[in-house]
Image (cartoon, rainbow, N blue to C red):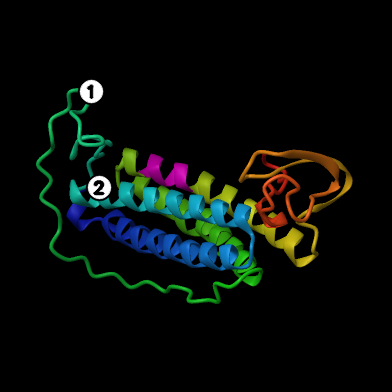
Amino acid sequence: MNFNESQTKENLARAFIAECTDGARYQFMAKDAKAKGFGFINTTLKQLAKNEMAHARVFYDFLLCGGEQCKPGDCETIEGQSNPKGCKPCECVGIDNIEVCIGLPFNNYLLPEALNISSTIEKHESADVYKQFEETALKEGFQEIAKAFHHVVQVENCHHLQLQELYNKMSKEKLYKMPQSNKWKCTNCGTEIEGKQAPEPCPFCGYPQGYYMVPLSDE
């Protein structure tokens, strides 16, 4: 199928917008986490924001190159150096305008509720939206784009589970409490303390309890 006449072209544009929106929301949430003394959650949210923008870049590059896979390094040098693979810059022409209709959630980005809201959004994107986009890309013959959506489905599901667990722990005030002894590690100085509860503050560097790593089931 001609890429410019495909539904996949519009789906890529919608996915790009959604990922940029998610990335921005995680940055807002990260600032709130830092202001409230949750250093570990701040770092976690900034990593999620970085993930979302990486997804957005992949979708953008597919659009830029007319549905072809634009690999990292094809259109730019890496850290100002020559591409180690010896790839030459591709001649991507881009698209002047894509008209899309998309509904976006604009919810509270303050913790802890934003964790729960974002978890729900990630679940919807992974279980419904991107899975459908993957199927459409396969039907229209865009194998590489389908693979990209498949990868994003897996990542967004991980985000959903991670955010939901953080919300459950925070809402129940169990971020830094465990029924059994646990090794707590300060993300600022690296101090490790054994116990059922993380120290407040860190006995070595004095940073708040929120800078200790939160034990999550996928770690």
Q: Quadrant of residue 217?
A: top right
* Secondary structure that dominates the magenta span: helix
In three-dimensional space, the C-alpha distance between marks 1 and 2, rounded to whole angstroms, equals 19 Å
The numbered disc on residue 51 is none
Mark 2 surroundings within 10 Å by alpha-carbon count, few (fewer than 14), some (14 through 19), many (20 or more):
many
Whether 43 is drawn above or below 218: the answer is: below
Whether 173 is drawn above or below 4: the answer is: below
Per the image, label 2 sits on a secondary structure element best described as helix
Per the image, label 1 sits on a secondary structure element best described as loop
Q: Is residue 114 left or right of residue 31?
A: right
Q: Residue at x 18, y 46 (%)?
A: 65
Q: Amino acid at mark 2?
A: Asp
Whether 86 is drawn above or below 91: the answer is: above
The numbered disc on residue 85 is 1
Q: Position of residue 49 (x, y in %)?
A: 46, 55
Mark nearer the N terminus (1 vs 2): 2
Residue 204 lies in magenta, yes or no? no
Residue 2 in view in this figure: no
Q: Amino acid at mark 1?
A: Lys
Query: Which of the two discs, 1 and 2, sits closer to the camera?
Result: 1
Q: Position of residue 70 (x, y in %)?
A: 24, 39
Q: Quadrant of residue 38?
A: bottom right
Closer-to-camera residue (100/196): 196
Residue assigned mark 2:
61
Q: Is residue 183 left or right of residue 3?
A: right
Which stretch appears magenta?
A: 146-152
Q: Is residue 67 left or right of residue 161?
A: left
Q: Position of residue 82 (x, y in %)?
A: 18, 28
